[in-house]
Amino acid sequence: MRNFIKYSKLKLRDGSESCSPVGPDFTKASNHTVALAGTQLEFKAPRHDPPPYGKIRQRRISNSYSLSDARVHGYNFQPSQSWKTTEVFFRDWSFCGPWFTGFMGDTSCFLQVIQLSEPDAGINFLHPQALEIASLAYITANYGYRVYDEDNGDMHYIAPVNWSTVSQLEVPSVQFDSERLMRGAAPERHVFIPISRSHIAYFSLRTLQNASGTREEVDKKVDPAPFKELVDNIVGSIRVTLSPEAQADWDEIRKNNPDAKVSDTCAPLKWPADVDKDGLTILEYDPKRYA
Amino acid sequence: MFSNAAPTQDVVIAGQHSGKPVKITPTAKPVYDQLVKLARDGNNYWAEITVKAINELAAGRLHQNNIFVKPGAVHRDGTEEFVMILPGCKVTCEKLDADGFRILHFEADIQYGQAIASGGAPGLYTATYRENDTWDTELEKRGRIREEKNRMVAICDSRYKDPDRAATVAAPRIAEAPFSGGSGMVNGDGFDLHYTPGEKKLGGLRNYRNAIRVNQYTELNESALLLARTMYQAKDIQGVRWISEDGGSGVLTQAMTILAGQGVKLPNHKVFLFNPTTSPNTAVKAAHSLQMKLDRHFNKTRVLNVVGNRDQLELIGNRWKSKADSLTTLQAASDIFAHGKSMHGVGLTMGTIVAGAAAVAGAGITAPAALTAFLTAVGGVVALGKIAGGAAKLGNTLVENLLPEHHDKLKGKF
């Protein structure tokens, strides 16, 4: 109750030069469970609390998902349109400064199921290497073409940064950040977890601090640590129970290749780059390819 | 060291051969040189604008109603000081007796390029729809809109800390423009965003003076100049739609006024104001002189928006009178009536509705402002098919019930 008053979106005065904002109380976050392609996915998320800018609505988990009805991404967002998505869950949480210094930023969490637009029977996302290729290709399809300066190849985004796996999961998983190279970093955590041979559960948790300037200036004005803590908490609460078929697949992969695992490190990709229509092959950047 | 010329001599930087000479004091010269260097390197469009504007002083483009000019002190000897606010720099000039100019002082920000890159200065961004009502924005390096037919460009208010937030707010609003095709189209195609950073809303009742005299709103000069350049460079792209959101109307109005002053025409482009918080009438005048296409509705103004509603009647009148506009008498009458329903307009227009609509329509109804009388009159002259439109907006159902066959005929016209 005290926090509700102390850290409110109401802005009556300018804050000090730097501030460590307070977001939702994760200890009170409720459990969310969803069955996707027979696989049970469980995670914790606080109540929806959108920023005071625009009308950002939450997306609630529904009873069942027909993953065969997935739609392609917009060509404007993903020019290759090589991946399809089923939107599952979306929430946005505001972070506020103390005593009427108002809104300081937000973190959103978006869960979707992604699959290739043109299904490829030869690939099994439960295999760690396949998952790794898929995650890198997917992020390239969405961000690899966003070039700022075509003359010297300056990009708007960089990924993957802070590459790792989701430690509490037995199934293969990949998580990494993408960051903006201009203005504030606007870090976005990407988490890829296979739920069947051809489907990947994909969480994206994006943080946007409410401050302007270079990355150093933004991080000085609004401390990024509380946002990161929420992201880590949510990712840390993910639990997966594979469907019997997926479990059998995964057991077989483990039996045949006991050493198969996701790489320990991965350097940022060399962008600009495009992704082929198959959704997996990274090609050289060509602004006219999908124009 | 190698020159014998006295260093205190003013240097002529423009208008040596023709026009009015523009001189610069030796202390301001190095800053100017640096700007010229940045402008020539081809990567700094803001510096190009600034250098060009200074050179244009020589062409005699400067006059009292030039909107970049903030008049300063008038000296005893008849010379006059004024301030020009340009992207990345503030120039203090003196108008000399002999019809020339002298630049006294430069307050230039050579790091302006970095300020644009970090979102600290106005810039043009490409907005891409992510998902769930949120948007990504990316700075467009050359400050040009995407070369796409019917591209939409939002001009946002200046109360956002980040263009991403501005895009999130602006997107559903530009979807309200009659020619946007709704949010499905806006989300699918994305749009370009002219972003002006700032802490406070532009215009509105709190800045009433600036809101109604929008072309004298000097804080917007910088952003408006950049937008004017963007608009000029987009002039050959077909069907660009410029849509302002709240106080963005001020930036758009100034940009259109700058272009109008330079004789530019944008006949292929459209313009729309969403809830303008600066005078929409000034905007419509500028849009007319650019020969821009205006849709059936020029703006969508919320009922409680005093500034936005203030000169609507004048606006409708201007649109009706203008040859550049396609507003018919019937539509003008309808708009006046619709405006009468808004809070601000209520007291102001009710009395003039009948007389006004009648005068506009030329049907000669002089009955007092009683609504029933007007509607009866409507019934009487409906054969002319003129004023009935005025009634349709207000008493659509009434007309529908009283004159069912005419209702269907009229329906399509609104």
Image (cartoon, coloured by chain):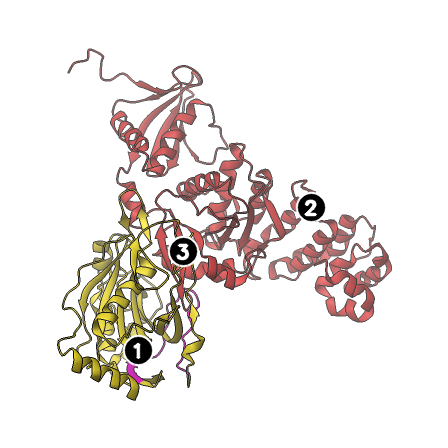
- Residues tagged by mark 1 and mark 2 found on one chain of the structure: no
- Label 3 and label 2: CA atoms lie apart by 35 Å
Q: Residue furthest top?
A: B4
**Relative to residue A199, is residue B214 depicted above or below?**
above
Q: What number is the disc on residue A197?
A: 1
Foreground residue, B94 or B315? B315
Q: Looking at the image, which is closer to me, B376 or A5?
A: B376
Q: In the rendered structure, which segment of residues is drawn in magenta?
A: A40-62
Residue highlighted by disc 3? B127
Disc 3 chain ID: B
* A173 to the left or right of B187: left
Chain of residue at mark 2: B
Residue type indicated by callout 1? Arg
Q: CA distance from mark 3 to mark 1?
A: 34 Å
Of callouts 3 and 2, the N-terminal one: 3
Picture colour for chain A: yellow
Dot 3 falls on a residue whose secondary structure is strand
Drawn colour of chain B?
Answer: red
Left of A204 or right of it: where is B389? right
Q: Residue furthest bottom?
A: A244
The amino acid at mark 2 is Trp
Q: CA distance from mark 1 to mark 2?
A: 65 Å
Same chain for mark 3 and mark 1? The answer is no
